[in-house]
Image (spheres, coloured by chain):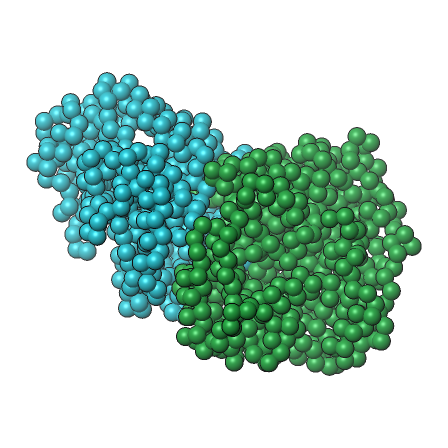
Chain colours: A green, B cyan
Amino acid sequence: MTAERSWWGWGTTDRALPDDECVQLARLVPGLPDRPRSVPRVGDLALPPSRLAAPAALPVTTEPAVRAAHTYGKAYRDVVRALSGDLAGAPDAVAHPSTEDDVVRLLDWAGSAGVVVVPFGGGSSVVGGVEYRGDRPWLSLDLTRLDRVLEVDAVSRAARIQGGALGPVLEEQLRPHGLTLRHFPQSFEFSTLGGWLATRAGGHYATLHTHIDDLVESLRVVTPAGVSESWRLPGSGAGPSPDRLFLGSEGTLGVITEAWMRLQDRPRFRASTSATFASMVEATAAVRAIAQAGVHPANCRLLDPGEAALSGASTAGECVLVLGVESAGLPVEGRLAELTGLARDHGGVVAAAEDSAAGAWRSSFLRMPYVRDGLARMSAIVETFETACTWDRVAELYGTVQAEVGAAVREVTGAPGLVNCRFTHVYPDGAAPYFTVIAAGRPGSEVAMWDDVKTAATELLGRLGATVTHHHAVGRDHRPGYDRQRPEPFALALRAAKAALDPAGILNPGVLVDAV
Amino acid sequence: MTAERSWWGWGTTDRALPDDECVQLARLVPGLPDRPRSVPRVGDLALPPSRLAAPAALPVTTEPAVRAAHTYGKAYRDVVRALSGDLAGAPDAVAHPSTEDDVVRLLDWAGSAGVVVVPFGGGSSVVGGVEYRGDRPWLSLDLTRLDRVLEVDAVSRAARIQGGALGPVLEEQLRPHGLTLRHFPQSFEFSTLGGWLATRAGGHYATLHTHIDDLVESLRVVTPAGVSESWRLPGSGAGPSPDRLFLGSEGTLGVITEAWMRLQDRPRFRASTSATFASMVEATAAVRAIAQAGVHPANCRLLDPGEAALSGASTAGECVLVLGVESAGLPVEGRLAELTGLARDHGGVVAAAEDSAAGAWRSSFLRMPYVRDGLARMSAIVETFETACTWDRVAELYGTVQAEVGAAVREVTGAPGLVNCRFTHVYPDGAAPYFTVIAAGRPGSEVAMWDDVKTAATELLGRLGATVTHHHAVGRDHRPGYDRQRPEPFALALRAAKAALDPAGILNPGVLVDAV
């Protein structure tokens, strides 16, 4: 945990790909330059002067390196903008509250001074959720000092955890209790509990409890209109859920400072395997049967042939289904046998004892963002988008994305690119397909080129009634698709709720709704 | 389905207890009169004159018997008030829309005429959710003509169902598809899909998908500000869930006219059994172990000794745990064995093959509301209240209710009464205890006496941080407890949302929030 965080790219600097690996990777995509662009030193870059002078008692800094590191999230377009040295949109200042009271005082000051506040957890947003695109002075509110597990209730298996705790930081504090939150998004190391809650993050479990939402007992949220704290309850029917209004509110209604979270015993029994399928038709039928059987595997990831090849799970042009079951108290072999039985019933070939595909998949999964950054330095376009739809539309969605996003890539870049797919989470009534696009960009035009591809993708998702995001959140980048998807009366209600809780309109403006 | 609905009591008139059975039942409670009060004929009762004259084109009636039958829900206090012939609060009129457009036109008219609208599904509210306690003219909006299954998607196992469909009516339409919603609240026969959704009803499943909330794909809601329709999605992370704002809104934000609901294949494999425990301490530990093991039994109902005796499950002074597992596609013996193993680990004695306790419990469960009405006619106080809390507080809650509600009963009635408990639903982090109170009332004072007991119960639930309702909803009766429980910033947001969606304040005023 001592490695230095990258200011421009994913994760830590020690894991960034060296130049020669970037060059090697670029062979994936014909037409790229023959050497990577250099990474600017943040000290060499010009930042706009800060327009803010916070009271000295507030934990606010205008230090340039800190402002630079809080300018963007970690989307492909963020990485490219940072690599190009564009820091024009940097926050005027960054706050590091150490207590909830600090958060209250910061919001009070910001409200009275008309300062925009953008909550910042691990800063791993890939949807423009932690930047600001307006003209007002703005403060990035870095919550990572609020990182303590404050209380553990081992009987109910729950803990009260501060919102700014990064994944490893909170798991480390839970480990001595034999408990775990078991929420492992790809960003696990570099994202916080509060960020997961504010964005309805998708986690470890491929079925059942796919989103962090289901792990919440209660929330504590600082809003400009006061502190909201719901009661710790395992279930309730008392009016609309207060927590569900704040879950997914993406920093527009308040700052999540604490949550009581449901925990798991650390699993002792685990089994995993994989199965291959000749086509997506068969594989999809198998996954649907599994999702509808009530077995609830912890892992159930389907890789299409392109994704299987890219991740090293299989280069034979087949689909790979990675399956895993786990339990703290009960043996899992019986459940794994039920799953492999269903896979075989639908034409799957189940792997022999040694589970190489699952292992290959996992290491590739964690390395992928670094690969993305390496390819970005080679001027490749490399980005993902994800969605969910009901089973009746999954095949059409998969086919339409291949055709239309493939066509958009060709049109924008002049050459074909890769459009791979995996299902990250599955439900009895549908699936969450996750697409990766890799193509050759023109140096200097990558962001605009990706935006064109993304516009085509968003349009087709909306046309097919597939959600604009399954777990990446809305942020600023998904606003057009979200505005189309969100029922208009709900928009009225949400705007009214925002006006009531954030009357000065300082909280993350531009995300989800425009201020009234 | 041709039996006549009772205007004053639960269900259908053919199942109301005859006088001699009422007398026999009353032996449970010392000090009751020796004969039941007679049931008034609705035609003999005086209704206040209707203050409404709706346009002739609207499906509105002022027929006295219809108004009488829409005056109250089916709480104990409703039954007693009806038996006493008190119809002073009857609706001025009752509407029976046959189409969603009827609903739109009715809300338009009501908004312009300043008429209060109280949505009415099956009318089985036990929390004062379908009456009106103000001075304005009011319309009961009976939705039961909107009762069609409009579309079935067998691949995704989902159906588009109108909000006014009663349980049996919708299940009958799903049966030919081999599918079932499998939502079986005690009120199943006499409550509607829209009512379940608006009140976050608790259903068949004792674990996992305990509330109807989890079975919702999308909602269509007529609000005075427009029709809200969310997209059919198996999962999403696009902003706060629009559906979760309407779930539990209890008719205050809009009228739910349709929903896409997740269905199940009809179970082919089922197994159930029961286990007895010497004490609630052991039994609670067993239930907690089961709830935390990830086995997800469909049934997991714990009856305390009083409840076991009352339901006929056991008269030996022991606790009874009823367990059931079901699946459409996979044998369930293995899972049942896991459950009974956990029960035995915690001192449970598992029943021999024949499962008499489970059967006794089920028939008692369905008969209970009719028993309640029979006892009410004997001037008994007989009512329930239900809650949920985390495991760390379950034992304290159980003991405190026994002590304090027991004391309240003694103080109010001058004699001890029964305070029984069952756990209706259980969670990894807590349980939902459901209490039944039976005591001797004084004829003419029963409602006031129950209200005093209920006040004591609500106060102690709030003190212990247990929810004011797990699945009965808030209505008007739970407002004091709900107002204490609901975080104040959420109240601000909810009031603002209501003002945006229902600017004339016509929808179910007094429920959840007061108009701004």
The image quadrant of residue A256 is top right
Q: Position of residue A437 (x, y in %)?
A: 67, 71
Residue at position x 24%, y 28% from top?
B418
Does any portion of residue B251 appear in the rendered image?
no
Q: Where is residue B249 in the image (x, y as percent from the top left)?
A: 44, 45
Q: Position of residue B48 (x, y in %)?
A: 26, 35
The residue closer to the viewer here, A389 or B325, is B325
Q: Is residue B37 above or below residue A205?
A: above
Residue at position x 80%, y 47% from top?
A91
Badge count: 0
- Is residue A491 rendered to the left or right of residue B134? right
- Is residue B135 rendered to the left or right of residue A349? left
Does any portion of residue B288 appear in the rendered image?
yes
The residue closer to the viewer here, A306 or B153, is A306
Q: In this view, which residue lies farthest toward the left?
A: B20
Residue at position x 77%, y 48% from top?
A2
- Is residue A42 rendered to the left or right of residue A101? right
Residue at position x 42%, y 66% from top?
A337
| Quadrant, the N terminus of chain B | bottom left
- Is residue A368 rendered to the left or right of residue B104? right
Q: In this view, does B21 lie above or below A282?
A: above
Q: Is residue B377 above or below residue B218?
A: above
The residue closer to the viewer here, B375 or B49, is B375
Q: Where is residue A479 in the image (x, y as percent from the top left)?
A: 65, 59
The image quadrant of residue A145 is top right
Q: In this view, which residue lies farthest toward the front?
A: A353
The residue closer to the viewer here, A57 or A144, is A144
